[in-house]
Amino acid sequence: MQSVDITKLMQDAARDAVSYIAEEHKLTLDFSLASLTDIDTVLSTLHQRQQQQSHSSELIFTLTNIIGAYIGEVFIANYGGNWHNNTADPSAPFISVQLSDKEFPFASVCYHKITQDNAILVANYVKQAAANVMQ
């Protein structure tokens, strides 16, 4: 997949996240760093629902990818970087944001928060990711 195609795909996915969160969670996202606290709220709600009754793997895949795309677009807008299709392991490719020599798989962070560790704060993860690049 060409980088232009990946970028468009992820921008479209981020817009899907904005629509989903507005409809299902009644929150308005604006692609600001401050909006990441709303993302944490949504992911916490999804984590609580997951604990009560497991979501389908297809739903989790879709939600983590669109919300991860939103987080990535916020990161790119504030710190720079590009979408990157990592195919190092052909059996488990993933799309991440690449900046300098670092990769940030935001969808994976969303997946981990929903399915395992609600204590993860996306807003803090993004700040730490940016700090790691600036070192």
Image (cartoon, rainbow, N blue to C red):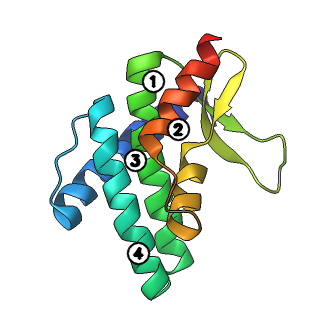
Residue at which label 4 appears: 48
Residue 105 is drawn in which quadrant?
Answer: top right
Q: Earlier in the sequence, mark 2 or mark 1?
A: 1
- Please tell me which residue lies in front, 90 or 102: 102
Residue at which label 2 appears: 125
At which x and y percent is residue 130? 54, 22
Q: Pointer 3: residues within 10 angstroms few (<14), some, or many (20+)? A: many
At which x and y percent is residue 34? 28, 34
Disc ID at residue 13: 3
Q: Secondary structure at mark 1?
A: helix
Q: Earlier in the sequence, mark 3 or mark 4?
A: 3
Mark pair 2, 3: CA separation: 20 Å
Q: Pointer 2: residues within 10 angstroms few (<14), some, or many (20+)? A: some
Q: Nearer the viewer, mark 1 or mark 4?
A: 4
Question: From the viewer's perspective, is residue 56 above or below residue 21?
Answer: below
> Residue placed farthest to the front in the image?
119
The answer to whether mark 3 and mark 4 are in CB contact below 8 A is no
Q: Amino acid at mark 2?
A: Tyr
Q: Earlier in the sequence, mark 2 or mark 4?
A: 4
Could you tell me if residue 6 is visible in this image?
Answer: yes
